[in-house]
Amino acid sequence: MTRASLDKQPHEVASMFDGVAANYDLTNDVLSLGQARLWRREVARAVAARPGQKVLDLAAGTATSSLPFAATGAYVVPCDFSLGMLREGKKRHAWLPLTAGDATRLPFADGVFDTVTISFGLRNVQDTEGALREMYRVTRRGGQVVICEFSQPTWAPFRTVYTEYLMRALPPVARAVSSNPDAYVYLAESIREWPEQPALAALLQKAGWSRVAWRNLSGGIVALHRGFKA
Ligand SMILES: C[S@@+](CC[C@H](N)C(=O)[O-])C[C@H]1O[C@@H](n2cnc3c(N)ncnc32)[C@H](O)[C@@H]1O
């Protein structure tokens, strides 16, 4: 198994991430031209974790996305269903409570987290709406969800250039830097298929989240969506 297909069979997705785990963070930095760090800073600002709060970082992979929340003194649980990604994360951040779990059947009780966040993960979950409902279930009343995901650039000329970059440049660059270039063909395809900003906001509302809003980063290459549990 080198890449998942667009029907996102969970075993294919998990095995694809198992395969890229060792080089995942480095490849991310290279392919995003350093933007990944900026996006993570903005996610941390949106989550605004405080000491003692409980934060679930879902689809946390190697737990790189969890570090900014942990740095605030919050109690962060990185959760993922790729054991390869979790093992890599455990090697680097042994002190974090990395937890194996599927986003559509979370191994947590109702209402236990102040914030549930997911960075570059929701697009890979086969049942998006099921995951949004599970995230709602494990969040306390008054708590929030913050979703960071690739999205659609809002300025049409840039969108065209970006789509060309994605579809044409990403796979050859990935071939040079990644242990599994095919995974980056999946990345490009899955971004193209992913709902635009308003459509994702509508899915959040449908799952029960209120006061849903989003903010574009890097011209809409990435969007941060937020919602609250009333
Ligand atoms: C692109 S990585 C993102 C990792 C990390 N959040 C980051 O920002 O670097 C996507 C992760 O989503 C995980 N994932 C996909 N579907 C999942 C599911 N149903 N349940 C849990 N994790 C899932 C994959 O195993 C992978 O580690």
Image (cartoon, grey):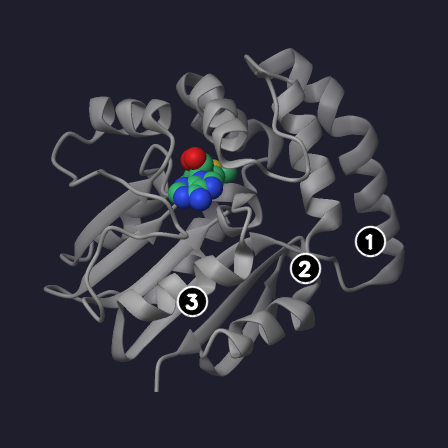
Query: What residue type is disc 2 on?
Result: Gly
Q: CA distance from mark 1 to mark 2?
A: 9 Å
For residue 32, which quarter of the picture? top right
Dot label at residue 220: 2
Q: CA distance from mark 2 to mark 3?
A: 25 Å
Q: Are marks 1 and 2 in contact (CB under 8 Å)?
A: yes
- In this rendering, position of residue 32 left or right of residue 192: left
Instruction: Specify few, some or many for label 3: CA neighbours under 10 Å numbering under 14, 14-19, or 20 or more.
Output: some
Establish if 59 lies above or below 198.
above
Mark 1 or 2, nearer chain start:
1
Dot label at residue 133: 3
Q: Pinpoint residue 186: horizontal percent, then vertical percent.
A: 67, 31
Q: Which residue is mark 1?
A: 159
Q: Secondary structure at mark 2?
A: helix
Q: Pinpoint residue 49: horizontal percent, then vertical percent.
A: 25, 65
For residue 81, which quarter of the picture? top left
Query: What residue type is disc 3 on?
Result: Arg
